[in-house]
Image: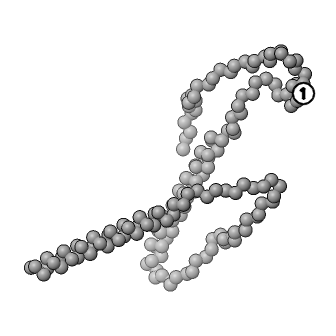
């Protein structure tokens, strides 16, 4: 019995050592990649930017190598698999379209900061204004409450 117990203990010890070695390796790997953000070089004005090399286009619908011809009874299974694959693809496409639609909803352009008064041509009004005369202050705009709930429309039928 002693020999068996020693064997088991040895096995357990080996396992522990192996696990520790693996953990150390993982820790070492993690540290390797962290080198901080690379600083981007400032471009000089007027200097032309180097064009990026064009990536080779991948052919759409590339045919994959045909395997061995399957027996007749396999055909039914294959058709079922194909249908499942097609359904998955359609579902994914629907999701993608939905996401695209969602993205469009929020894009309403950047809100411009309210400039008071009419737009003036630079320099023109500055010279005309008399020194010492105070400029009329613009009317304060009423603040809009943040997160105002909008009216819910009619529920769309699916």
Point out residue 114 in the picture as x, y percentages from the top left corner.
72, 28
Decide if residue 114 is on the left or right side of residue 134.
Answer: left
Q: Along the horizontal axis of the image, is 60 left or right of 149?
A: right
Residue positioned 70% across, 31% down in the render: 113
As drawn, 115 above or below 65 = above
Q: Residue furthest left?
A: 1
Which residue in the rendered view is the most extreme toward the front?
132
> Where the C terminus falls, by quadrant?
top right
Q: Residue at x 36, y 66 (%)?
A: 23
Query: Dividing the picture into quarters, in which one does residue 140 lie?
Result: top right
Q: Is residue 32 above or below residue 96?
A: below
In this picture, is 3 found above or below 51? below
Residue 108 x %, y %: 67, 38
Residue with the mark numbered 1: 124
Splitting the image into 4 quarters, where does residue 64 fall?
bottom right
- Whether residue 131 is visible here, answered yes or no, is yes
Q: Nearer the viewer, residue 149 or 132?
A: 132
Residue drawn at x 72%, y 54% as measured from the top left: 42
Rate crowding at label 1 as few (under 14), some (14 to 19) or many (20 or more) other CA atoms within 10 Å.
Answer: few
Determine whether the residue tagged by mark 1 lies in a helix, strand or loop: helix
């Amino acid at each position: 019995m002693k020999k068996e117990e020693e064997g088991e203990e040895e096995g357990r010890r080996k396992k522990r050592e192996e696990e520790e070695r693996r953990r150390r390796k993982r820790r070492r790997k993690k540290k390797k990649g962290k080198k901080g953000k690379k600083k981007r070089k400032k471009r000089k004005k007027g200097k032309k930017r180097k064009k990026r090399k064009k990536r080779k286009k991948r052919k759409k619908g590339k045919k994959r190598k045909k395997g061995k011809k399957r027996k007749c009874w396999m055909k039914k299974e294959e058709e079922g698999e194909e249908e499942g694959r097609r359904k998955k693809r359609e579902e994914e496409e629907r999701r993608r379209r939905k996401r695209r639609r969602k993205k469009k909803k929020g894009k309403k352009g950047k809100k411009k900061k309210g400039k008071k008064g009419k737009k003036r041509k630079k320099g023109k009004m500055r010279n005309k204004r008399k020194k010492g005369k105070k400029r009329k202050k613009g009317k304060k705009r009423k603040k809009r409450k943040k997160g105002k709930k909008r009216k819910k429309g009619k529920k769309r039928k699916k």
